[in-house]
Image (tube, rainbow, N blue to C red):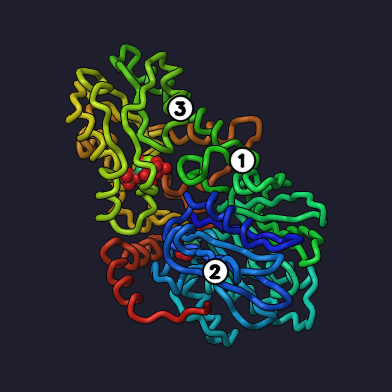
Amino acid sequence: MCGIVGIVGKSNVNQALYDALTVLQHRGQDAAGIVTCEHGRLFLRKDNGLVRDVFHQRHMQRLVGNMGIGHVRYPTAGSSSSAEAQPFYVNSPYGITLAHNGNLTNVERLSREIYESDLRHVNTTSDSEVLLNVFAHELAVRNKLQPTEEDVFAAVSQVHRRCVGGYASVAMVTGYGIVGFRDPHGIRPIVFGQRHTDQGVEYMIASESVALDVLGFTLIRDLAPGEAVYITEDGQLFTRQCAENPQYAPCIFEHVYLARPDSLMDGVSVYKARLRMGEKLAEKIQRERPEHDIDVVIPIPDTSRTSAVELANQLGVKFREGFVKNRYIGRTFIMPGQAARKKSVRQKLNAIDLEFRGKNVLLVDDSIVRGTTCKQIIQMAREAGAKKVYFCSAAPAVRYPNVYGIDMPSAHELIAHGRTTEEVAELIGADWLVYQDLEDLKEAVGGGKVKIDAFDCAVFDGQYVTGDVNEQYLDRIEQARNDAAKSTVERVSAIIDLHNN
Ligand SMILES: O=P(O)(O)OC[C@H]1O[C@H](OP(=O)(O)OP(=O)(O)O)[C@H](O)[C@@H]1O
Ligand SMILES: NC(=O)CC[C@H](N)C(=O)O
Ligand SMILES: [Mg+2]
């Protein structure tokens, strides 16, 4: 779930790209990059780190040009080496750069095709570099000196035929324009909008609408699954459905955890969806234990706050902020490596004892994935003097790996994999554990004013919408990307990098 952005403006876009990436920082904390284009030349800066660490004034001054794209990365393939930071670049045809959110599931086959038939070279283990090469090849075979929107859309159609998985992407064709495209299931989010300036209309494509809001762009709409938007350097906008059989199945986990609550995603307010999750959870608690003895509802900051407020409201129980979050520590779930994640929870959250002492507390989190957070939090609640510690998750049990752009490749690292709710409760040390029901979660997200009836819910139900994910595939990614395997990859890739910046 990286963050992507592209802007075609009327003056330098470097600052706007930087600001947009800052707003999308919650989608990726490992690396950041911006490439801009002026008079047919590209200016690229990318490196590991947060946006504020990667771009210094000296870089910003050199990122000139009225159009550009940017990326914040949370690795789901390859390594977290700075050589795999995005945007990626290929020089032929035209010079194309690309930023990608998602994950391809047929990357092995594509890599072979790229080498054997397309005669192209991919230098990293990143699936995004593969995606870029497929797009570049398909644009190259159109054999045009000056590509038109027809050529760009034809290349995207071919990408849809060849690539499988989740991909929301922006690609810049040097000297011509920026294209945004979304996979035929619409798994990962992407929106576009516009802003009026004295020099004319500027366009922006981004992962989440919040990036548009903050920069004064108005949302035009989400890209439909399979659809592409192309904005030429001089500001003409074209859209086209490029997939043969698009099927809406956006990732429901965006609403649970990934997205900011102030974003509108596929027409649904993430904030309202989270409120409804709290409401549904309260109904379940009332069903299961009408005579419950909960004294206070306490959220685990940050993401669960919205659901927890509504849950407390519905239960008619006091809502209290019992944990204080250190605002200088990032999101722990998207950190690479279990050791860092574990250490960060304690650094990030501290309990206010008086909210716990002698009380039966209901702790609320948006989700339990590896169980890193809840185990420590429950322990902290007990140390702070809680009488009983109940725990609820606004999402159902996460039991299956994600293969579309969230780094949960290994079933065995998921605390609920192969375990019942009671077993998980025991393992995390909760006196009672309540998970949201999947039907209620779907209703919370897709049952508001805007109806969505199909989602990618693979992490909860093991159904993979692209239809190509089987046991062998899951075994392979588990071997390649479990925590232990990743640390070997990191060591090896740290030795030699090939950079294009
Ligand atoms: O079971 P786990 O493996 O610990 O993962 C789940 C936890 O991780 C996330 O928090 P995170 O700190 O990443 O972000 P937040 O501040 O947005 O809640 C999520 O909100 C849960 O609290
Ligand atoms: N989280 C993402 O969207 C990751 C994009 C890409 N698969 C990478 O690993 O860089
Ligand atoms: Mg959290």
Q: Which mark is residue 59?
A: 2
The residue nearer to you, when weighing 356 against 326, is 326
Q: Is residue 63 visible?
A: yes
Element carrying mark 1? strand
Circle 3 residue: 278
Q: Is residue 282 left or right of residue 17?
A: left
Q: Secondary structure at mark 2?
A: helix
Q: Position of residue 136 (x, y in %)?
A: 64, 77
Answer few, some or many: residues within 10 Å of disc 2's Cα (few below 14, many 20 plus, some between 14 and 19): some
Residue 313, numbered circle: none
Answer above or below: position of 281 versus 325.
above
Q: Quarter of the image holding residue 152?
A: bottom right
| Residue at figure coordinates x 82%, y 57% from the top left | 199
Looking at the picture, does residue 396 appear above or below residue 195? above
Q: Residue at x 58, y 76 (%)?
A: 89
Query: Which one is closest to the eye, mark 1 or mark 2?
Result: 2
Q: In terms of image quarters, where does ligand 3 lie?
A: top left
- Determine the image quadrant of residue 231: bottom right
Earlier-in-chain disc, 1 versus 2? 2
- In the displayed structure, 129 sits above or below 435; it is below
Q: Considering only order in the chain, which callout, 1 or 3, is on the residue closer to the N terminus?
A: 1
Residue shown at the point (76%, 59%) measured from the top left: 240
Residue 264 circle label:
1
Q: Position of residue 180 (x, y in %)?
A: 67, 61
How far separated are the C-alphas under marks 3 and 1?
18 Å
In front of the other: 168 or 422: 168
Q: Residues within 10 Å of mark 3 (few under 14, many from 20)?
A: many
